[in-house]
Image (cartoon, rainbow, N blue to C red):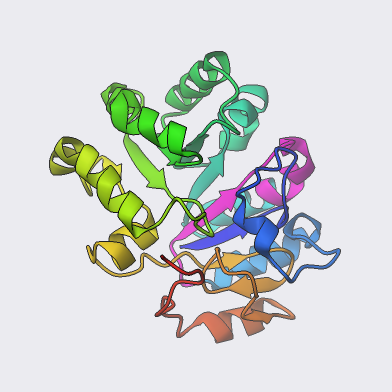
Amino acid sequence: MMGFHLDGQICRVGCAFCYLGQRTGGGAESARTLPAGLLEDIVSRLLATEIAVSISEPARRWRAGLEALAAAAQRHGKSLTITTTPDVVAADPWVLRGASRVSLSVDPAKHSGRDAWETALTMAKREGLEVIALVSLATPDFADALAGGLIAELLARPEIDAVSLNGLKPPPPWCDRAFWLRFCSRIRPLLEEHLHRRLHLDCYVGARILGLGGCPAKPDISPGREFRSCVYQAEPDFVFADAVELARRVSAYVPPAVCPFVIR
């Protein structure tokens, strides 16, 4: 998989916990300003079979870049995953065109109301997509609501194919190893039934805390020509000049051995 953040910085929602806000690189250029020909060339040369694109609000600002990536993915036989909010899909259903999977954010900051959520699910169902509820444990109270029944409610929805639990990055003091162990204990029946099938743990929780496999690898291109071996790290690994250089430098890609943030 290769990820693209078309904005590369913080979107209009401006969540206080957004990992993009920790980034130290980034100039005026963003992926949405890259020429369509360059995006096409990048996709054509990547060994990755999946292109993952994050779309923040307002979606219309990223339309040219998204449509260029979607067209390139289709031409080169790569699947397209869109990660966005229910509000974006409800207002701009065109973001789903060409996608085989959509991850819809669920958290107090980006989930504005049931109407947008229901509309987004309707749009995704009509498009025949795989629908993932991407749940961010944004606050202790929201984590309590999730463990207290919200995760089970999401899993019970036939329109939702899977639920992915997303920890904050970098983790705030309350979201430490002890918290995750308590949280997993509270949802143990759901994990026993659905883990790695319809319920997925955050990458650093599964790989680093619980040791349930290795890092799933989330490399990212953004903003502009910056490449990060992990989307969550602040510093880019390098800035590439063109698709040939990028393909050469990532041909031997391996997931980072260490998380880019401290797990307490």
x then y, percent, for residue 26: 77, 68
Residue 238 falls in image quadrant: bottom right
Residue 137 higher or lower than 254, as above or below: above
Disc tally is 0
In the rendered structure, does residue 65 fall within the stretch colored magenta?
yes
Q: Quadrant of the N terminus?
A: bottom left
Magenta stretch: give its range: 47-66
Identity of the residue drawn at 55% across and 30% down: 108
Say whether residue 215 is visible: yes
x then y, percent, for residue 232: 55, 63
Please, which residue is most extreme toward the top here? 115
Q: Quadrant of the C terminus?
A: bottom left
x then y, percent, for residue 132: 40, 38
In the rendered structure, does residue 166 fall within the stretch colored magenta?
no
x then y, percent, for residue 179: 34, 50
Q: Is residue 20 left or right of residue 182?
A: right
Residue 146 falls in image quadrant: top left
Residue 203 higher or lower than 42, as above or below: above
Please, which residue is most extreme toward the right here? 28
